């Protein structure tokens, strides 16, 4: 009996240890349901971990670039010079500057002048509205002779990141009876040469002398916009020092000096509170020989001054134009001359370069 009982016990133990047979309606996948569920729980966690790892790497990389840029600018001051001039940005690009008539300017002539050896600058000359009809089809000599007519002349100095074509007020000033002469500094548009503050100022002086040689006693006004205000005050200071001042100086959206403008520029926002901001970003501009010190130049200018500035200017802050006006208004050099500041309210939406749209502009200029 004992042996039989032992045999039965062994059989029961073997039966208990053996795996239960699968039902016909039960699949292998169903039988392994719990392990499959465990795998499914781990997969999203792995994905989240991988995403966080990649995001962390991206943040570290961006932080490294952010820290490296100031050192790169400091070691290569030419980078800051490029950013000040932006002469490599040509908008619009696919334009033949030799043919202003393609832009509807049938009363405009294109010249090329040579201020220095190996430097050639492109010049546009638009005649007053009274001469529009006569100007069609005329050659360069006719346009040069027309400068001797009894009409005043405006020499316009444009800002960075553009060409003479970006000067939108052609029609407005021409309709008011002005000859309008503008040009691309060396390195801009189709002008040949490398940009520098000294070179830009010399180009402007050369064009001014070229105009005066043909306009006789007709009044000549200097109009500078944005970066062109720096060229304009450099030029007019020189003209006053040699006692040949223009009739008046018009500054549109001016700044005090290039350091203060660079500090206030929208591009500087992400680094403005970076330790050593001036040393990293502003000193390289000075090292490159770029100052455009309007606040110093106005102390040596002796002619009428008109400053135009929009309150909503996002590029050159309004307070810089106002500050420049206050410096000029208290300067001895303007004792006998009119100094005027004309603000344009934010609601007008003129921003940095649309003051010419103001219906009040003709009255202001008169």
Image (cartoon, rainbow, N blue to C red):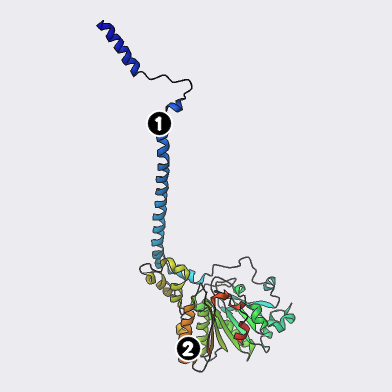
Per the rendering, the mark at residue 243 is none
Position of 281 with respect to 87 (left or right) is left
At a point 59% along the width and 75% down the height, the residue shown is: 354
Residue at the image position 48 percent from the left and 20 percent from the top: 24
Which of the image's four quarters has the N terminus? top left
Tell me where residue 225 sits by quadrant.
Answer: bottom right
In the picture, residue 151 is in which quadrant? bottom right
Q: Secondary structure at mark 2?
A: helix
Local packing at callout 2 (Cα closer than 10 Å; few below 14, some 14-19, many 20+) is many
Above or below for 8 versus 19: above
Q: Is residue 39 left or right of 129 when viewed as pictured?
A: left
The number of numbered badges drawn on the structure is: 2
Q: Which mark is residue 34?
A: 1
Where is residue 2? Give x, y as percent. 25, 7
Label 1: which secondary element? helix
Instruction: Tell whether 3 sits left or right of 51.
Output: left
Say left or right for 162 vs 297: right
Q: Between 59 and 154, which is closer to the camera in this rendering? A: 59
């Amino acid at each position: 009996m004992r042996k039989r009982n032992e045999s039965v016990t062994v059989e029961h133990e073997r039966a208990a240890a053996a795996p239960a047979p699968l039902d016909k309606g039960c699949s292998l996948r169903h039988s392994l349901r719990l392990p499959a569920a465990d795998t499914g729980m781990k997969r999203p966690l792995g994905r989240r971990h991988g995403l966080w790892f990649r995001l962390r790497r991206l943040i570290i990389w961006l932080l490294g670039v952010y820290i490296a840029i100031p050192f790169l600018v400091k070691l290569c001051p030419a980078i800051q010079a490029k950013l000040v001039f932006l002469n490599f940005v040509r908008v619009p690009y696919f334009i033949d500057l030799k043919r202003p008539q393609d832009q509807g300017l049938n009363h405009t002539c294109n010249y090329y002048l040579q201020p220095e050896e190996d430097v050639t600058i492109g010049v546009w000359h638009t005649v007053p509205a009274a001469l529009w009809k006569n100007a069609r089809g005329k050659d360069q000599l006719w346009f040069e002779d027309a400068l001797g007519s009894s009409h005043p002349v405006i020499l316009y100095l444009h800002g960075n990141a553009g060409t003479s074509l970006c000067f939108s007020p052609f029609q407005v000033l021409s309709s008011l009876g002005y000859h309008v002469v503008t040009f691309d500094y060396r390195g801009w548009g189709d002008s040949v040469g490398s940009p520098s503050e000294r070179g830009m100022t010399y180009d402007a002086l050369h064009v001014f002398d070229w105009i005066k040689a043909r306009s006789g006693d007709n009044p000549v006004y200097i109009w500078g916009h944005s970066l062109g205000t720096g060229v304009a005050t450099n030029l007019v200071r020189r003209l006053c020092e040699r006692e040949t001042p223009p009739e008046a100086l018009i500054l549109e959206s001016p700044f005090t000096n290039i350091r203060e403008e660079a500090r206030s520029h929208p591009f500087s926002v992400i680094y403005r509170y970076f330790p050593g901001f001036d040393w990293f970003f502003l000193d390289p501009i000075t090292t490159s020989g770029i100052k455009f010190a309007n606040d110093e130049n106005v102390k040596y200018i002796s002619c009428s001054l008109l400053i135009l500035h929009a309150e909503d200017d996002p590029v050159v802050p309004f307070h810089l134009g106002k500050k420049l006006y206050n410096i000029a208004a208290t300067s001895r050099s303007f004792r006998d001359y009119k100094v005027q500041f004309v603000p344009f309210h934010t609601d007008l939406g003129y921003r940095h370069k649309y003051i010419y749209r103001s219906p009040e502009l003709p009255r202001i200029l008169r």
